[in-house]
């Protein structure tokens, strides 16, 4: 067992790609979210761990950190799940040099699939050293030790425009703490499920994009119920471990208070923008 540690996790955003309320939508969910505000206002999904480990880089990342009063100058790891733009606004990395940043930055380890790394390398070309980007290709089910973290990418069930891309989710360990971050994905295939049986999780952060809908490449209420039962059957969560859901679409997902009523009896916690937890 590793040494006793904690992981502090901030949900920087909890919506699917269009936001909630969505950019150009006047449906009932979007209208009510605008009226009620508060936890019903959701921006594109990402999380920040210990102020130094960022998972995904959404387009509105600047606004998120401004509202929280934090800086990304301290991040040492950026893990990208896949190339969809709501998770992969890689041009924001352009601002890691003078005159946009006047302080000396440490190298940022950017981890992702070969497709992700190829896109970043092709865009920045020889400027990756100037921007202090250490680009790290990662592969499913392999182990990577970076700074204080042990990282295991796992296969997500998701598609992009790149036929060779494998979308990734991440198992992350720090000392004796272990979490799973699962966005974007449909129900896992057996190779990922069998790999996850190796771990006991303190927290699982999983997507619930579709809620009442159904699609192979995102999770619905029914899919989450099956996954939750699989976790229980295989004793995957620690006794005090918790499951959080995020990445909600306005299309089929209700407002926050209704999500609480749906998920609370199942022992699942619906996240909201700027929720902070410690595991």
Image: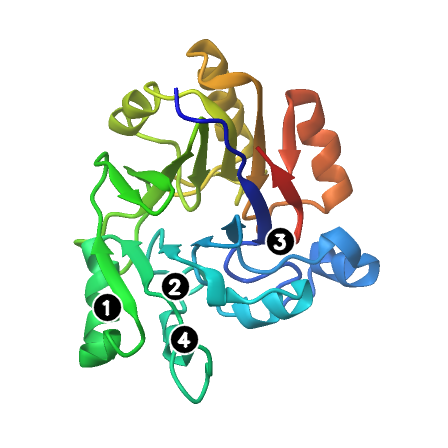
Q: Residue at x 40, y 86 (%)?
A: 98
Q: Residues within 10 Å of mark 4 (few under 14, many from 20)?
A: few
Q: CA distance from mark 2 to mark 3?
A: 21 Å
On the image, numbered disc 2 is attached to which residue?
88
Q: Are marks 2 and 1 in contact (CB under 8 Å)?
A: yes
Mark in the foreground, 4 or 2:
4
Tell me which label, 1 or 3, sits earlier in the chain: 1
On the image, numbered disc 1 is attached to which residue?
119
What's the mark number on residue 104? 4
Tell me which label, 4 or 3, sits earlier in the chain: 4
Tell me the element at label 2.
Answer: loop
Q: Residue at x 19, y 65 (%)?
A: 118
Q: Residue at x 70, y 27 (%)?
A: 264
What's the mark number on residue 77? none
Q: CA distance from mark 4 to mark 3?
A: 41 Å
Image coordinates of residue 87 in percent, x first then y, are 42, 59
Tell me which label, 4 or 2, sits earlier in the chain: 2
What's the mark number on residue 250? 3
């Amino acid at each position: 067992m590793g040494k006793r540690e904690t992981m502090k996790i901030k949900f920087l955003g909890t919506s699917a790609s269009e936001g909630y309320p969505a950019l150009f939508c006047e449906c009932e969910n979007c209208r009510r979210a605008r009226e009620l505000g508060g936890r019903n206002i959701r921006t594109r999904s990402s999380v920040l761990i210990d102020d130094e480990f960022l998972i995904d880089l959404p387009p509105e990342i600047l606004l998120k950190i401004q509202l929280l009063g934090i800086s990304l100058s301290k991040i040492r790891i950026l893990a990208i799940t896949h190339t969809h733009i709501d998770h992969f606004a890689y041009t924001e990395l352009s601002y890691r040099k003078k005159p946009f940043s006047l302080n000396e930055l440490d190298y940022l380890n950017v981890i992702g699939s070969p497709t992700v790394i190829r896109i970043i390398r092709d865009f920045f070309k020889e400027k990756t050293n100037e921007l202090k980007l250490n680009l790290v290709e990662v592969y499913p089910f392999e182990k990577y030790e970076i700074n204080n973290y042990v990282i295991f990418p796992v296969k997500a069930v998701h598609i992009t425009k790149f036929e060779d891309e494998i979308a990734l989710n991440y198992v992350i360990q720090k000392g004796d703490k272990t979490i799973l971050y699962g966005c974007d994905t449909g129900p896992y295939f057996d190779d990922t499920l069998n790999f996850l049986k190796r771990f006991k999780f303190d927290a699982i952060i999983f997507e619930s994009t579709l809620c009442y809908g159904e699609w192979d490449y995102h999770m619905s209420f029914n899919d989450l119920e099956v996954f939750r039962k699989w976790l229980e059957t295989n004793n995957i969560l620690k006794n005090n471990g918790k499951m959080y859901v995020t990445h909600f679409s306005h299309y089929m997902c209700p407002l926050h208070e209704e999500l609480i009523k749906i998920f609370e009896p199942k022992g699942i916690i619906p996240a909201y923008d700027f929720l902070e937890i410690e595991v």
